[in-house]
């Protein structure tokens, strides 16, 4: 299974209008921000970066089920962060329930 761990500092993120749309800063070109939408393309997502636009998006737009292979590093990073935040919330809720 491919690792989602990256070398170097994590990407900087800015949340947009919904929890599933974010700006992710380019690691190689600081100051360049990519728009990432986690819900697009049957939840494969969509990103403005060159890797996604030129390499992934033709297949992503035709896909009927999600595949991590069709995501760029920004989408994979964002999903990892998103999943961790969600699991933290679930963990907190379960802990609160135990304490009731
Ligand atoms: Zn990207």
Image (cartoon, rainbow, N blue to C red):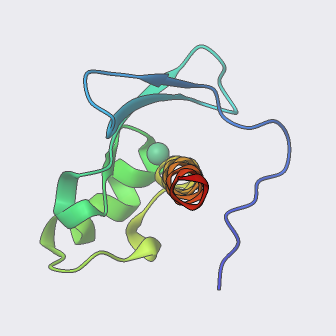
**Residue found 58% across the figure and 50% down from its top:** 92
Q: Is 16 in front, or is 47? A: 16
Q: Is residue 70 left or right of residue 91?
A: left
Of residue 2 and residue 78, the one placed in the foreground of this image is 78
Compared to residue 32, the image places residue 40 above or below, namely below
At 65% from the left and 86% from the top, the residue drawn is: 1
Residue at left offset 44%, top offset 44%: 50
Side (left or right) of 62 relative to 76: left
84 over 9 or under it: above or below? below
Residue 88 lies, in percent from the top left, at 59, 51
The residue at the far front in this view is: 100
List x then y, in percent, for residue 35: 36, 31
Q: Is residue 29 above or below residue 88?
A: above
On the image, the x and y values in percent for residue 16 come to 33, 22
Residue drawn where x is 32% and y is 49% of the image: 38
Tally of numbered tags? 0
Residue 30 position, x and y percent, is 66, 19
Q: Name the outermost residue toward the top.
A: 31
Q: Residue furthest right?
A: 8
Q: Quadrant of residue 69?
A: bottom left
């Amino acid at each position: 299974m491919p690792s989602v761990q990256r070398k170097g500092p994590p990407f900087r993120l800015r949340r947009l209008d919904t929890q599933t749309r974010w700006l992710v800063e380019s690691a190689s070109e600081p100051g360049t921000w990519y728009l990432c939408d986690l819900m697009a393309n049957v939840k494969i997502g969509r990103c403005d970066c060159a890797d996604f636009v030129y390499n992934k998006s033709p297949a992503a737009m035709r896909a009927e089920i999600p595949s991590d292979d069709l995501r760029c590093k920004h989408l994979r990073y964002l999903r990892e962060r998103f999943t961790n935040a969600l699991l933290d919330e679930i963990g907190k809720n379960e802990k609160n329930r135990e304490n009731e």
